[in-house]
Image (cartoon, rainbow, N blue to C red):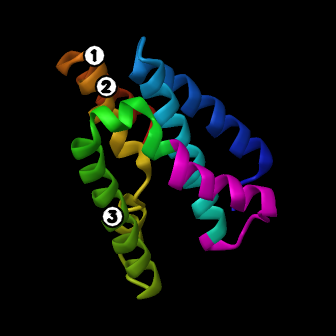
Amino acid sequence: MSTQKERDENEKFSDELNKKVAGKDKDAYDYLSLMFRAWRLLDDLYDEDYPLTKEDKLLLIEILFIKIPTNKFFIKHRDTLLSQHVSTWNEWRAGDYLRNKKNPNYNLADMLDGSPANLLPVVALLTQGYEKMKEVNKIIFTECLI
């Protein structure tokens, strides 16, 4: 369980990274912000390590059923992004399975965390091209995975 300070720092870092990834595409930025917010709420709900209010749960439902499906960036790139959603889900389930099996390779379970961070290079590619995708990958590998 992370502290409130760690959560605040992570949120600030994610927001700055989402801005870099989305570039001038506000809809892409909104999509990423929604995905990361939903993921945080889902993680808190599943792990039961951080209290969620009724309002938090309603927000999660709103994000998943209304805000993401009606986001213009998501609509435009639905097929590509949905495949990433599936991969994220599968990675999360694999990591969870390894943790529950008390697998000695816990680092692999952490690596398969299923964070929506795997969306960042894809969104960078869609909004700003291949070079931006490489730049975002470098940020992820040097600043996020340390």
Badge number at residue 124: 2
Residue type at mark 3 is: Glu
Badge number at residue 91: 3
CB within 8 Å, label 1 to label 2: yes
Residue 49 in the magenta stretch? The answer is yes
Please indicate whether residue 136 sits to the left or right of residue 54 in the image.
Answer: left
Eyeballing the image, is 94 above or below 72?
A: below
Check disc 1 and report the residue beneath it: 128
Q: Count how many numbered circles sit on residues in the image.
A: 3
Q: Residue placed at 30% from the left, 20% from the top?
A: 127
Q: How far apart are the alpha carbons under marks 1 and 2?
A: 6 Å
Residue with the most extreme bottom position: 101
Residue toward you, 4 or 19? 19
Eyeballing the image, is 88 above or below 74?
A: below
Image quarter in which the N terminus is found: bottom right
Residue 10: where, in percent of width, then height? Answer: 62, 39
- Look at the numbered disc 1 and give the secondary structure of its residue: helix
User: Which is the main secondary structure of the residues drawn in magenta?
Assistant: helix
Q: Residue placed at 72% from the left, 69% from the top?
A: 49
Q: What are the residue bounds of the magenta stretch?
A: 46-67
Q: How far apart are the alpha carbons under marks 2 and 3?
A: 21 Å
Q: How far apart are the alpha carbons under marks 1 and 3?
A: 26 Å
Badge number at residue 14: none
Query: Quick one: label 1 or label 3, which is nearer the N terminus?
Result: 3
Residue 72: where, in percent of width, then height? Answer: 40, 30
Q: Which mark is in front, 1 or 3?
A: 1
CB within 8 Å, label 1 to label 3: no
Residue type at mark 2 is: Ala
